[in-house]
Amino acid sequence: MVPASALAAAAPPTPPAAGTPASPAAGPGPSSGSCPSGAFCLWDRHGYGGTRTAHELSGTDIESCIPLPAGASAGSLANRTGRPVTTYQSAECGETGEFDTYPGGGTWVPDSPYRVRAFKIWEN
């Protein structure tokens, strides 16, 4: 008779079920940028490098397109607002370019797949 522990050790790992979402990114690590709780932060370079701008709910119109200043763009971001935030490649929040929505509460994106030029913070 083979001990159960030996069978478990020999069994191949079970693949995730089809349609199972990928694990969310872990919280901020030691190399992550600093972003205060309740804010949406953008850095002008990838890897949380360069200048950081923090947008708080109190100074941001909810569900409105917020363009970055002319000529500015961001390469990394953190969403700590507690609300979903959509980032846009277009400075006018146009959906013809790239855009992604990130859940609130602690989403950290060190390398955005496109240059962020505008965003919207959603109510829910």
Image (cartoon, grey):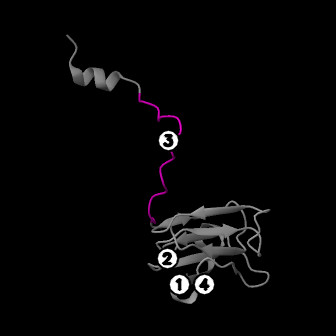
Determine whether, in the image, residue 31 is placed left or right of residue 47.
left
Labels 1 and 2 touching (C-beta < 8 A): no
Residue 102 in the image, given as x and y percentages of width and height: 56, 64
The segment highlighted magenta reads 13-29
The alpha-carbon separation of the residues under discs 3 and 2 comes to 31 Å
Pointer 1 residue: 56
- Outermost residue, top side: 1
Q: Residues within 10 Å of mark 2 (few under 14, many from 20)?
A: few
| Amino acid found under the numbered disc labelled 4 | Asp
| Amino acid found under the numbered disc labelled 3 | Thr
Question: Which sits in the foreground, 51 or 120?
Answer: 120
The alpha-carbon separation of the residues under discs 1 and 2 comes to 14 Å
Q: Secondary structure at mark 2?
A: loop
The alpha-carbon separation of the residues under discs 3 and 1 comes to 33 Å
Pointer 3 residue: 20
Identity of the residue drawn at 45% across and 69% down: 105
- Choose the circle earlier in sequence order: 3 or 1: 3
Identity of the residue drawn at 31% across and 26% down: 9
| Amino acid found under the numbered disc labelled 2 | Ser
Residue 10 in the image, given as x and y percentages of width and height: 34, 22
Q: Residues within 10 Å of mark 1 (few under 14, many from 20)?
A: some
Question: Which sits in the foreground, 100 or 114?
Answer: 100
- Choose the circle earlier in sequence order: 4 or 3: 3
The alpha-carbon separation of the residues under discs 4 and 1 comes to 10 Å
Pointer 2 residue: 34
Task: Examine the residues drawn in magenta and state their main secondary structure.
Answer: loop
Determine whether, in the image, residue 58 is placed left or right of residue 73.
left
The alpha-carbon separation of the residues under discs 4 and 3 comes to 34 Å
Pointer 4 residue: 61
Of marks 1 and 2, the one in the foreground:
1
